[in-house]
């Protein structure tokens, strides 16, 4: 999915690509045995820069998920990751918490999982092809696997930004996964510096900071409570919204509207929120996904 540079003039593209060609490892296609129906995987784009998050949609078939709760955290499903530089491993949620990123999946809904951390491991740190497939509790494959590509940055701005991230990988990943947190001072510093730059990482950093400043925190970077800061939120929101993927847009809309309401928004923010919601209303199939459903509701 390419970035939308002019949200008002260009319609939002479908945010999640269909499953792409399988890895040379034919296991992704279920070649080692029949892949059971039940789960469809798709991502916000096909190609990522190193250390970028993968927003993975886990969508049920017509039967839906059997129980409430994030199935990756309840153990109902397991995500197997095939990295480019080692043996496959199972995704391990770094923290069991219901975020917009890891929204609760009900019987007739899918959800989006942010893939940046597996335990303490940075998932996309190494360039190369990555395979993803879903397994049930018995280890049987659930639907076709997919592949994404992670590339090393090439422009000077992107190389400098990745070097900053690589110097503080755990702080960066934790701040991204939790979508903010003033108490994560090192992560906040990394994201603030990324947001000030011109790299391909900058729009994502601004989006996460928009979510961060929509919230209040009992413990801020200065050691004191911090309330919601609309001016900061608005600046980062407007600096990110037209350039990030639709999953992150949905997160920004949901958090801003929940915390400030329609009456608390500037005309510039409210225009983008309303246009995004109109697009969602015209694509009702997206509302089966809890992350998009939350963005559509007051």
Image (cartoon, helix red, strand yellow):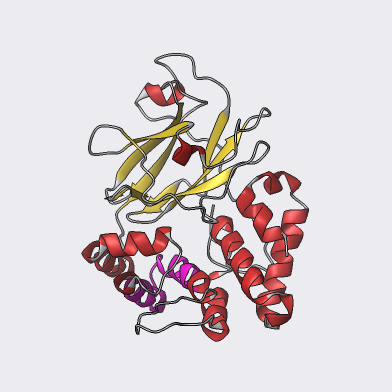
Location of the C terminus (image quadrant): bottom right
Position of residue 169 in the picture relative to residue 39 (left or right):
left
Rendering coords of residue 48 (x, y %): 40, 52
Please name the residue shown 58% across and 26% down the image: 38
* Left or right: 291 in relation to 76: right
Q: Position of residue 106 (x, y in %)?
A: 64, 40
User: Residue 107's quadrant in the figure?
Assistant: top right
- Please indicate whether residue 10 sits to the left or right of residue 204 in the image: right
Q: Does the image show residue 258?
A: yes
Q: Main secondary structure of the magenta part?
A: helix
The answer to whether residue 55 is above or below residue 60 is: below
Q: Is residue 142 magenta?
A: no
Check the image and report above or below for 194 versus 119. below
Confirm whether the magenta stretch covers residue 200: yes
Q: Residue at x 35, y 27 (%)?
A: 24
Judging depth in this view, the residue of 244 and 35 nearest the camera is: 35
Quadrant in the rendering for residue 138 = top left
Q: Position of residue 69 (x, y in %)?
A: 55, 42
Displayed quadrant of residue 270:
bottom right
Count the labels in the image.
Answer: 0
Q: Residue at x 28, y 38 (%)?
A: 84
Question: In the rendered structure, which segment of residues is drawn in magenta?
Answer: 188-209
Choose between 97 and 274: the one closer to the eye: 97
Would residue 14 be seen by someone viewing this image from the given angle? no
Of all residues, the one furthest to the top in this rendering is 33
- Image location of residue 279, percent across then percent down: 73, 58
């Amino acid at each position: 999915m390419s970035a939308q540079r002019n949200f008002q003039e260009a319609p939002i593209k479908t945010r999640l690509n269909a499953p792409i060609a399988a890895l040379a490892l034919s296991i992704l296609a279920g070649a080692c045995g029949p892949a059971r129906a039940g789960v469809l995987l798709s991502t916000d784009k096909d190609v990522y820069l190193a250390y970028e998050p993968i927003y993975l949609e886990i969508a049920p078939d017509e039967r839906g998920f059997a129980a409430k709760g994030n199935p990756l955290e309840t153990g109902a499903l397991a995500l197997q990751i095939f990295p480019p530089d080692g043996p496959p491993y199972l995704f391990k949620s770094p923290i069991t918490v219901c975020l917009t990123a890891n929204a609760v999946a009900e019987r007739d809904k899918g959800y989006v999982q942010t893939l940046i951390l597996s335990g303490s491991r940075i998932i996309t740190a190494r360039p190369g092809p990555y395979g993803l497939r879903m397994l049930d509790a018995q280890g049987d494959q659930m639907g076709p696997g997919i592949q994404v590509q992670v590339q090393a940055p090439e422009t000077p701005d992107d190389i400098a930004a990745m070097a900053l991230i690589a110097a503080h990988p755990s702080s960066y990943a934790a701040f991204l996964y939790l979508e903010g947190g003033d108490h994560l001072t090192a992560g906040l510093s990394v994201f603030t510096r990324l947001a000030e730059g011109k790299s391909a990482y900058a729009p994502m950093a601004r989006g996460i900071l928009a979510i961060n400043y929509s919230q209040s925190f009992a413990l801020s970077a200065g050691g004191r409570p911090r309330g919601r800061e609309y001016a900061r939120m608005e600046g980062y929101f407007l600096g990110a919204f037209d350039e990030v993927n639709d999953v992150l847009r949905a997160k920004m809309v949901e958090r801003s509207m929940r915390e400030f309401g329609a009456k608390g928004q500037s005309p510039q923010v409210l225009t983008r929120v309303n246009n995004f919601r109109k697009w969602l209303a015209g694509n009702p199939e997206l509302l089966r996904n809890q992350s998009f459903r939350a963005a559509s509701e007051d």
